[in-house]
Amino acid sequence: MRILSVDLGTSNTVAVLSAHGRPPRVVEVDGSATMPSAVFAEEGGTLVVGRDAERRARLDPTRFEPNPKRRVDEQTLLLGQDVVPVNEALAAVLRRVLDETTRQLGGELPDEVRLTHPAQWGPTRRNVLLSAARLAGLTGPLLLVPEPVAAAAHFASFPGRAPAPGQALAVYDLGAGTFDVAVVGATQNGFTVLAEDGLPDLGGLDVDQALMVHVGREVSHSDPQRWQRLLRPESTADRRTRRALQEDVKAAKEALSRLPQTEVPMPEPFSDVLVTRGELEALVRPALLRSVELLGRTVAAAGLSPDRLAGIYLVGGSSRLPLVGSMIAEKLGIVPTSLDQPETAVALGAHHVARDGISMRTQNVEGQVAATGTPPGFPPPVATVPGTPPGGYPGAAPYPRGGYQPAPSNFPSLPPAAPPKKDRKKLIAGIAAAVVVLLAAGATYLLWPSSSSSATTFSAAECRQPGAADPEGFTGCLRQLAGTVADGQCAPGAGAGDIAPPKNENIGVLTTCSAPALAGAQVTYLHGVSAAKVKEYTDRLLGAVGGNQVRAAWKGNGLDGSYSAASGLSSAVLVFTVADRPLAGVIYQKAGNGQTPLSAGDLATYFEQNVQPGE
């Protein structure tokens, strides 16, 4: 029986093969256990993948896509002048893995292929993965394995690590593109996901970007115009230079997982930058804190406390950051475990999952997912009912993404606290008061997005018209656009009178926040009643400032669009809009006390570093 397991990751793809009765082993592609998931479109339409794609990217970066999995929700990619379907890009990556596997098998094809996917992926995304597998030439049975289930199976494959039925393991997966967390319960038949969540705007790529911004702060003052060309390259030479710098920054990040300090080689005319581990940790600590807090909430959503877990397992290449383990130990009181190579854990674990422990299967299916029902001994499918899971903490916050899964009957839950025999009236009164508070908090949670809801994403249809605003003036769609800026001081309205819309004209919902790290400036967000109203408003602001403008595209928090910055004698404005919905943001700086406003280029840099929501 020849079984091939493939973990098609955001940055790297790992394949594992077992054949001829031998133990599973990693399939090395181009001499490495990990193959970049990158694709490059040649002039004739041929797709080149892996390290070959990365080398070709230096010739023409516009034809290069380093992370096609991150764009799974898009139908097509624009590579140079060629429009490439996303499933074909993913198929090219899988085809390279299949070619190498077939070569190592002496021309034979695997009898069974297992593809891993994030637990949060719904049928649409799984369909893209399946169609890519068929396009790649993967024949025979195709089985889909949720990544946390595969990771748990890998953890259990080590002697003395296997959780007993009724125990649970938390899987902390910090990959290149996203952060995923799941609590996986052990049953008699295998593993089942009890609760899962994630952050689409946190991954190793975001750590790379934070380090790039830090490096820019160190050197950009020596030649601001040259640095702007690196940030927004227009020539092929500048794109090559930017690509090389991105690779050097990534290498520096990886080195700081092993060394206390390292240097980032910089292109001329900039000097090399010395970066310490402490500096990197200061940059990423707020983002990693979000992941650890989400880990704690997901454990609670499964009806458990950290001390009842069989362990916390770290997977994903970015979990190598020493700060990850120390923050989990500090916040949750549990020292996490990292076994083997975190990059290969998911692919190796998929081999250890029992065949009857895989609930989503495809047998010779083209472009669809065939569910064969719940395997014997497993709980029912994931519920979508918000609320506190059975046995969970009383008053726990509603689980925001995907609901929870009822645990097996032998699965431990928190025992109810025994009430004291005396002061029963006080106890009842206290419980009643607590219930009132919790109900009020729950209602607030449901009616208003909290300041931590920046990770919540909304579809274009949901944002077509502004809904009710929360006490700080945000609709849910505006919070998605604002990201972490919404955590600052914000209030409904347009703020400064200079950018207020005409009186008695309803253009939509506005709210204004103090601009982070820019004294005397503000950021105003608009959820317009129509795209035409948004354009009319933003064009008026840019026209009032005049002067030369800087324009570029932006992307983050599940949104993409463009921005324009303009700077005059007394004020500077940057407007950023969203491509498919009537949302906009305005950074407004008015000069005073003899000072001049930021230039259009500097304001664009400020937007990218402080206001643009993370990818």
Image (cartoon, rainbow, N blue to C red):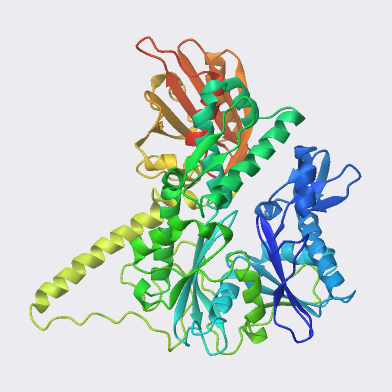
Q: Quadrant of the N terminus?
A: bottom right
Task: Tell me if residue 257 comes above or below residue 297 in the rendering.
Answer: above
Q: In the image, is 76 to the left or to the right of 501?
A: right
Q: Nearer the viewer, residue 347 or 295?
A: 347
Q: Residue furthest left?
A: 422
In the rendered image, is residue 56 in sight?
yes
In the rendered image, is residue 370 in sight?
no
Look at 43% across and 78% down and name the residue there. Answer: 310
Look at 66% across and 60% down and name the residue there. Answer: 9
Look at 28% across and 63% down and name the residue there. Answer: 438
Look at 62% across and 42% down and name the residue there. Answer: 248
Q: Nearer the viewer, residue 429 or 547?
A: 547
Task: Tell me if residue 356 comes above or below residue 28 in the rendering.
Answer: below
The part of the image, by quadrant, that contains residue 297 is bottom left
Q: Residue 186's x, y, as percent?
A: 50, 83
Q: Residue 583's x, y, as percent?
A: 54, 37
Q: Residue 393's x, y, as percent?
A: 33, 72
Q: In the image, is 611 to the left or to the right of 615?
A: left
The part of the image, by quadrant, that contains residue 562 is top right
Q: Residue 219's x, y, as percent?
A: 53, 28
